[in-house]
Amino acid sequence: MKKIVLLGALKRALRFEWYFSRQFDRLDRFLSGIALSALDPDHWTKLTSHIYSARGDYQRDGLFSWEKKWFDKDLPPAPCRILIGGAGTGREVIALMDLGYEVVAFDPASSFVKKTQDLQQKRACLAFEQGTYKDMADESSETAARLNTTIQSHAPYDAVVFGWGSYTHIASETVRIDVLKKCLHLAPGAPVLLSFWMRGDDTERARTRAWKAGWRLGQLFVGQKNPRAEDPGDDISGRAGYGHFFSRREIERIAKEAGYKIARQAPGPYSGVFPHTTLIPESGS
């Protein structure tokens, strides 16, 4: 009898959980539409940094199996020097230092950078600075100048790693290209390893009715001052902030415009591993 009562209670609780989860998802999509239509890429980046900073700690438990295989194949053997962007709280940094690499790293989330002080003091990480990929590409701000002074003081690098999915959080195609061009100077002839969210070449992000309502409200908010065309790869969520879903052709085009070519093709969208690819300079062999 007790089990029957418990079963009935669980059924009701699960129905409530399903209902509220669905409403929260609709709210998330509505807010995503507002943010993408009314804000600009700099605001998307700040929003994303805030979301990740609010988490405190984040993934410090070693490399994923697909990363281990990828790094084994495409990183030059240790000892050598690697630049890691979007390094979070140091997951890749710790793993690569343990393999004998020298590492310089940065991340936009202030709380993450604070948690990495022990990496510099106890584990001999060469540097771990706060900064965004836009800061790396454009040295006009004080934060950007500080970041670039540190990065350049340890150059040249033997490889560049854009930390787990972090290339996807770059909110402007101009910055996506410029940061790769910067890598050509910081790491001449070296591989650049990217991981990112992905979509099919001929598919667009599904837009729900809640998202479309948010988009229209955002457009009304900015009026004619900031009209924005929808990019089918863009998304914002309360869990991960801004992210761009790349098509394979898009990655190939961006690499070419920056002076790179693809040495190892990214798998299809989430085909058993997180999408990733390795770039090498077009002038290289």
Image: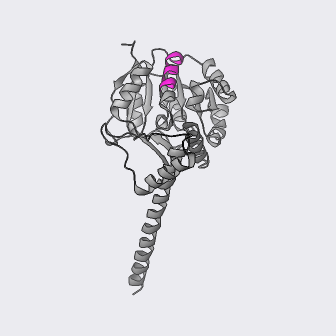
Q: Which of 186 and 66 is in front in this view?
A: 186
Would residue 193 appear left or right of 35 to someone viewing this image? left
Counting from the top left corner in percent of width and height, residue 190 is at 45, 18
Q: Give the range drawn in magenta.
A: 177-188
> 38 or 166, which is in the foreground?
38
Give the percent coordinates (x, y) of residue 41: 54, 37
Main SS, magenta region, reads helix
Looking at the picture, the colour scheme in use is one colour
Where the C terminus falls, by quadrant? top left
- Image vertical order of residue 5 relative to residue 255, above or below: below
Residue 164 in sight here: no
Q: In this view, does 96 lie above or below 229?
A: above
Observer able to see residue 112: yes
Could you tell me which residue is drawn at 49 percent across and 34 percent down? 163
Q: Residue furthest right?
A: 142
- Percent position of residue 27, x then y: 49, 58
Front-lying residue, 109 or 241: 241
Q: Residue at x 34, y 32 (%)?
A: 248
Occupied quadrant, residue 126: top right
Percent position of residue 270, x then y: 34, 42
| Residue name at image x 50 percent, y 38 percent | 169
**Depicted 190 relative to depicted 251: above or below:** above
| Residue found at the far front of this picture | 224
Tell me if residue 179 is in the magenta stretch: yes
How many numbered marks appear? 0
Quarter of the image where the N terminus is located? bottom left
- Near-viewer residue (237 or 87): 237
Horizontal relation, residue 104 to residue 75: left or right: right
